Image (tube, grey):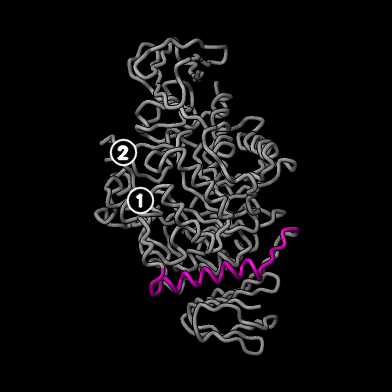
Amino acid sequence: MHRFEVWAPRATTLMLKVNTDSLAMQGPDPRGWWRLDVPAAGDGTDYAYCIDGDSTPYPDPRSLSQPNGVHGMSRVYGHDSFEWSDADFRAPGLPSGVVYELHIGTFTTDGTLDAAIDRLDYLADLGVTHVELMPVSSFDGGRGWGYDGVALFAVQESYGGPDALKRFVNAAHEKGLAVLLDVVYNHFGPVGNYTGQFGPYVVDSHRTPWGGAVNLEDAGSHEVRRFFCDNALMWLRDFHVDGLRLDAVHAFVDRSAIHFLEQLAVEVEDLGNQLSRKLVLIAESDLNDPRVVTSRELGGLGMEAQWSDDFHHALFSVLNGAPNEGYYADFGKLSQLAKAVEHTFVYDGIFSEFRDRIHGRPAEGLTQDRFLGFIQNHDQVGNRALGDRICETVGFARAKIAAAVVLMSPFVPLLFQGEEWAASSPFQYFVDYDDPEMAQSVSIGRKKEFKAFGWNPDSIPEPGARSTFENSKLNWSEAGEGAHAEMLRWYRNLIRLRKVALQFDTTHDRQTHVHFSEHDKWFTMKHGAITLACNLGLNARILEVPEANRLLLTSQEGNNLVDGSISLAPDSVAILE
């Protein structure tokens, strides 16, 4: 016996196609739900819906399995059959964590969740505490970043499907690693989204970069919000995921008395209490609004943490010589890096030339472990024209400096797959749409976008080419060789030092202080007994560090501590105690 249920307020008749049979659904009830109990159906049964006499079978918007892709029939999947062995696992606290973002399709040669399990020992040995997966919800085709998901409750089949995700999470927990999952609730992908056949999931009254906005406040929004909340609870409850990263929450349009993020925070907290587990929500927000990570009791939306873009932009621009393109036009000064480290938001109610308006609000009163800091992530690498990494962009020496600043910063550090060994493989934008017009549109749009930045359109990798995807796969054999091995040792030492020597005091705000010279291109960053000293100038420089008595790490031989001063070679960094 299996009960089929679907929200379809727009339908006047609804037929359930089960294998080869067509059965009339019962409904709708006053809220638009249709239901039917089918005695012969159960796990493994294929089904779809035909709406208002249309012979086209549409997959279930809440399908848990799409074995034949997002256009195919849905398959009944039962969560209870998997045998878990992680009952005693408790996720490490995020404030003391080291997060590692990875993309299942390019993390290993096979590009599956099961293949990724074989690398969990490596991540645990590196010092990672939280593994963050880019989206795994089903999208069109066999390869993609995952941000164009359309069957949000189903795990991408090319990654291994739902059981494979459970095996991955279970194995991670056995290694002591928490798992975070990136989810996309601000839009649906452009190919394979059939939710509009069933109900008002998207509205045209508001627009986003991806088209109409997700319906969070108009008629029918109560069920749309339920759809996304239930999706979040499913990953946390049924897949044992320890937290979610919410993509681009600034794209939500919600003027409800209870904002969608607040509703989600309440429901996730309730679930955590039921399960006796600490579950976290991490937002990606372009708003520079501290209310996103302020507790609900103090009038905030209650997210545990958010990504810190201002820190990335400030650090990248300083290392890359202040590139005057896109949002980097707002950055490039050491004073801005100092502000990001000490105060989190650089744009905290001041004028942004890039935006041509006042942007942001001060984050005073929030401890900085509410923010994730990074020099690389999928966006900051993959949204470059060639998907080039920090080593290619600023050079090996400055990539070492970037790692030191990120891992010694007051933020929760986030690493992107392969950065710890200066991976030579790029991370490029790739898709696998079966719609030729959409594939061509993406290609043309990508080339047009980067042509405006001065790139030769012919040099832009073709998103739909399989080679673009294959070129983005990590080459694990290089991790132990030459400069790659040197960078890996550097990261291992930094992570170890962070955990052992840096005891971040989260009970008081603003514990990190920066001194710098814009003209001479040096800066120091001090937290407690630890001081980071960096020389970005062309010449060797001696900096006074009277409180330091011991050199802990240096990116270059010859950097020496003598009588309260550190001698630094050009483009080098040292960490002292």
Which region is colored magenta?
Answer: 480-507
- Secondary structure at badge 1 equals loop
Labelled disc at residue 433:
2
Q: Position of residue 53 (x, y in %)?
A: 36, 11
Q: Position of residue 506 (x, y in %)?
A: 72, 59
Q: Position of residue 109 (x, y in %)?
A: 35, 54
Categorize mark 2 by other alpha carbons within 10 Å: few (<14), some (14-19), many (20+). Answer: many
- What residue is shown at x 56% (from left), y 70% (from top)? 494
Labelled disc at residue 134:
none
Decide which of tag 2 and tag 1 comes sooner along the chain: 1
- Secondary structure at badge 2 equals loop
Q: Amino acid at mark 2?
A: Tyr
Categorize mark 1 by other alpha carbons within 10 Å: few (<14), some (14-19), many (20+). Answer: some
User: Which residue matches tag 1?
Assistant: 110
Would you say residue 376 sits in the magenta stretch? Answer: no
- What residue is shown at x 48% (from left), y 63% (from top)? 316
Residue 94 vs residue 480, the one in the foreground: 480
Q: Position of residue 158 (x, y in %)?
A: 37, 41
Residue 544 vs residue 152, the one in the foreground: 152
